[in-house]
Image (cartoon, grey):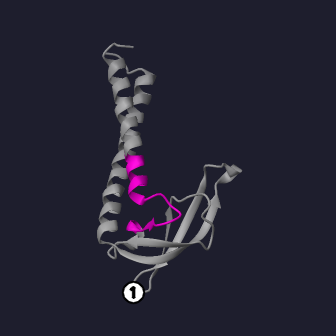
Amino acid sequence: MGLPETGDVVLALLVVVSGAVAVRCARRLVTVTRVLRRGVRTGGECVRVTAEPYHRSDAVRHFFAFHTTDGTRVEFEAMVRRSTEEGTPVTVTYDPRDPAGTAAVTGRGSWPPVLQALALTSGCGLAAVWFTAVLVHGVLGGG
């Protein structure tokens, strides 16, 4: 039995990484679903919009802030439409036990948080399945 080929090692790494990301996104999907049903809703606003280096069009990050019922200011990052600018008011839903870890922007200006998490989970899960199929096909002598 020899060493695995470089392509097999790369595919195995892609399976692990895409699978891990899919699991993380699935956990976020469960959290967001729970928070939207039972969470606290409050007003918040976009406090910062940053562009990644080289001003790539797909690399804009949006940060939001809100105050919990006890007055604590919480800041978090969320995916929203490009047109969201600093100062844009939003509705935030969160779990009071972990406001920073569960906060989600709901309402106008964003995709529904459940659809975001579902799209990411599905995409990464399908990638993991595809990479696994290619790896198995190659290892079993099909390629």
Q: Secondary structure at mark 1?
A: loop
Residue 49 lies in what quarter of the image? bottom right
Q: Is 62 located above or below residue 132 in the figure?
A: below
Q: In the image shown, does 140 or 68 lie closer to the viewer?
A: 68
The spot of residue 114 in percent (x, y) is: 38, 57
Extreme-bottom residue of the structure: 70
88, above or below 114, in the image: below
Looking at the rendering, which quadrant does residue 83 occupy?
Answer: bottom right
Camera-side residue of 80 and 63? 80
- Find residue 7 and report its horizontal and vertical position in percent: 45, 23
Q: Is residue 92 left or right of residue 58?
A: left
* Magenta-highlighted residues: 101-121
Residue at the spot x=50%, y=76% of the render? 44
Residue plotted at (39% across, 14% down): 143
Q: Residue 128: x and y, percent?
A: 37, 36
Q: Is 76 placed left or right of 129 in the picture? A: right
- The residue pinned by badge 1 equals 70
Q: Residue at x 61, y 68 (%)?
A: 48
Query: Farthest front residue?
Result: 108
Crowding at label 1, few (<14), some or many (≥20) Cα neighbours within 10 Å?
few
Q: For the view shown, which residue lies furthest in the right direction?
A: 54
